[in-house]
Amino acid sequence: MTTVRALDRGIILCHVCHLQTSIHDENTPCPRCKTRLHARKPQSITKTWLLLITAAILYIPANLLPIMTVNYLGMATPSTIMEGVITFINLGDWFVGGVVFTASILVPSMKLIGMFILLIYVQYGRLLPPKTCTIMFRLIEWIGRWSMLDIFVIAIMVALVNFGNLSTIEADWGALAFGSVVIITMFAAMSFDPRLIWDHIESNEGNK
């Protein structure tokens, strides 16, 4: 089935208020909300690549540096994310261990890999069907809201865990790196324009 994009009909939408305007109004303020109009997010691929590479680099210290330090009876024990997961599991707290593993390792890894796949798709060709790419992007956006769950868990533990001054928990540099990864991947997802997925397939069909 042949599809026609609004862009092919000379129509663009405001990103904020979704007002339909002419393509000739591109790079001018929206008549309704005054947001600058663009047919596609400017330099979407470049910005997303830069943010994603930065997040991937920070993901290394986020997993190698201690994310928290447990002080018990005067003895400080720093733990990385994986060590924290193993500690919780060994203590029999499978739920917290599972939450930390999912929020700190599984979700960020899925987001990074998913965004890399989408960028490669829109730049170099068909790795996956466009509908699958769209579902993948929606999933990345959806799980992004849960990415800070691990930081919340640590913050709550830091605030609550204090066994009569015998034991305390402190957030460490790994938490800062991990928080940076979460925020940067959220910006990467925001800078990516999902319409490029369909632009790619439409341009391929147009060239046949």
Image (cartoon, rainbow, N blue to C red):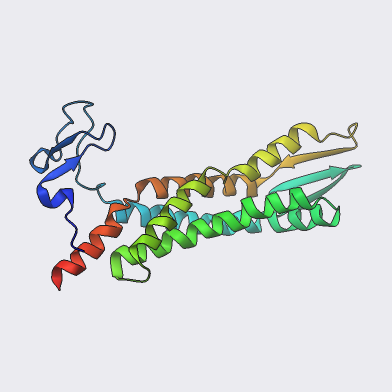
* Res 202 quadrant in image: bottom left
Residue 107's place in the image compared with 157, above or below, is below
Whole-percent x and y of residue 159?
A: 75, 32
Left or right: residue 184 versus residue 96 is left
Whole-percent x and y of residue 97?
A: 74, 52
**Image quadrant for the C terminus?**
bottom left
Residue 24 seen by the camera: yes
Residue 18's place in the image compared with 144, above or below, is above
The foreground one among 10 and 114 is 10
Residue in view at x 29 percent, y 65 percent: 123
The foreground one among 143 and 155 is 143
Residue 66 seen by the camera: no
Left or right: residue 141 versus residue 74 is left
Residue in view at x 63 percent, y 46 percent: 175
Residue in view at x 42 percent, y 56 percent: 135
Residue reaching furthest to the front: 1
Residue reaching furthest to the bottom: 208
Left or right: residue 166 versus residue 29 is right
Whole-percent x and y of residue 104?
A: 63, 52
**Image quadrant for the N terminus?**
bottom left
The foreground one among 8 and 109 is 8
